[in-house]
Image (cartoon, grey):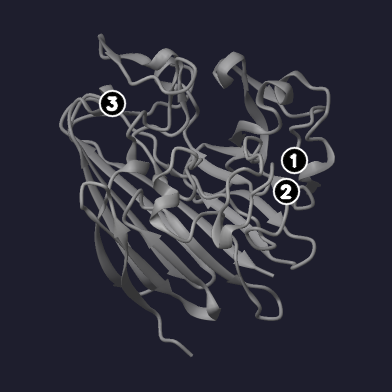
Amino acid sequence: MREPQVEKSAFGTLPDGTAVDLYTLWGAGGLSAAIATYGGAIVSLKVPDASGRLADVVLGFDELEGYLGKGNPYFGCIVGRYGNRIAGGRFTLDGRAHTLAPNDRGNHLHGGLRGFDKVVWAARPRESPKGPALELSHLSRDGEEGYPGNLSVSVTYTLEDRSLRIDYAATTDRPTHCNLTNHAYFNLEGEGSGTVLDHRLQLWASGFTAVGEGLIPTGEIRSVQGTPLDFREPTRIGDRIDALDPQLKLAGGYDHNFVLDRTGAPPWRCARVVAPRSGRVLEVLSTEPGIQFYSGNLLDGTLRGKGGRPYPRRAGFCLETQHFPDSPNRPEFPSTALRLGERYASRTIYRFSA
């Protein structure tokens, strides 16, 4: 059996000649994760089923060129400075107005035109008592994409037991906003194996942030009771995805922030997903107050991923732990403000079983 370790290999070069590396973390029980320094992307995540058969359960590309293409829908990347949307690409913080790069129908999405998904992160392998780890770091300069302050960020991936743990940390030298997450697309039957509509999802969330045009929150936290967004009990993803519901119509399916119930001590239980054929199970735990469930509505079969296989609509799902969308403009939401002397810290665990 392979001892837990981290292996480094070349993954290609950017058009400007910058080298991009791929680090593979080898964990216990056959679990492995390959992380690229470009965007901090989870390129591969191999997970065994009950019989020990391994499958790569995240969508993505075999080569760097795929991640550089305009059609890449944030596969597996680190999202920042702000995951999700900020209305109108602007906010006011401590009386000062800031204009961000608009990149989504006049709004600011996932950090802008060149967010954290499009930078090459510095990497340092680490051995933790729990298992192999990779620490990525990046300095986002004052004014990048319109954000104030120099933001020093680190993201650490750790394989422990049958889990991939992600620890986010950041500090700033000026008041700013920070909301980091990962944008992995999962298919627990194995990437490229069809849609995820038969997967059964449970969310520990009694409410969601209702959205209007552009998927911008209206400010209302609405109960899931009696709606197609009620996943408090295990429910097949495809059962109600095309229901005649205004919220689903706006998103073309599920693309909503769920307000977690957060009972007990953190990290809180967020989600559980079961694949019917392989029996693989994914549990998500986090210290964040919300989770974005996205059902891959914009995939359309034109994008070819690993092995040249096309990814049809709803070929993967995302469970992005986060603060709420547009929090900088919604004082009633949990704050994402980060100030001098404060430390942003967040943890998410993706735990696998069968």
SS class of the residue under badge 3? helix
**Spatial distance from mark 2 to mark 3, Cα to Cα?**
35 Å
Say if residue 97 shows up in the picture. yes
Category of crowding for the residue at label 3, using alpha-carbon neighbours closer than 10 angstroms: few (below 14), some (14–19), many (at least 20): many
For the point 46% across and 59% down, the residue is 43
Q: What residue type is disc 1 on?
A: Phe
* Horizontal side, residue 19 vs residue 163: left or right: left
Residue 126 drawn at (x, y percent): 28, 69
Of callouts 1 and 2, the N-terminal one? 2
The count of marks equals 3
For the point 64% across and 28% down, the residue is 208
For the point 84% across and 41% down, the residue is 239
Category of crowding for the residue at label 1, using alpha-carbon neighbours closer than 10 angstroms: few (below 14), some (14–19), many (at least 20): many
SS class of the residue under badge 1? loop
Residue 306 drawn at (x, y percent): 55, 60
**Spatial distance from mark 1 to mark 2, Cα to Cα?**
7 Å
Q: In the image shown, does 219 or 75 lie closer to the viewer?
A: 75
Report if the CB atoms under discs 1 and 2 are less than 8 Å apart: yes
Q: In the image shown, does 264 or 185 lie closer to the viewer?
A: 185
Q: What residue type is disc 3 on?
A: Glu
Which residue bears the numbered disc 1? 231
For the point 66% across and 36% down, the residue is 297
Of callouts 2 and 3, the N-terminal one? 3
Query: Residue 201 got which mark?
Result: 2
Which residue bears the numbered disc 3? 145
Residue 353 drawn at (x, y percent): 64, 68
Q: In the image shown, does 241 or 202 lie closer to the viewer?
A: 241
Q: In the image shown, does 194 or 144 lie closer to the viewer?
A: 194
Say if residue 347 shows up in the picture. no
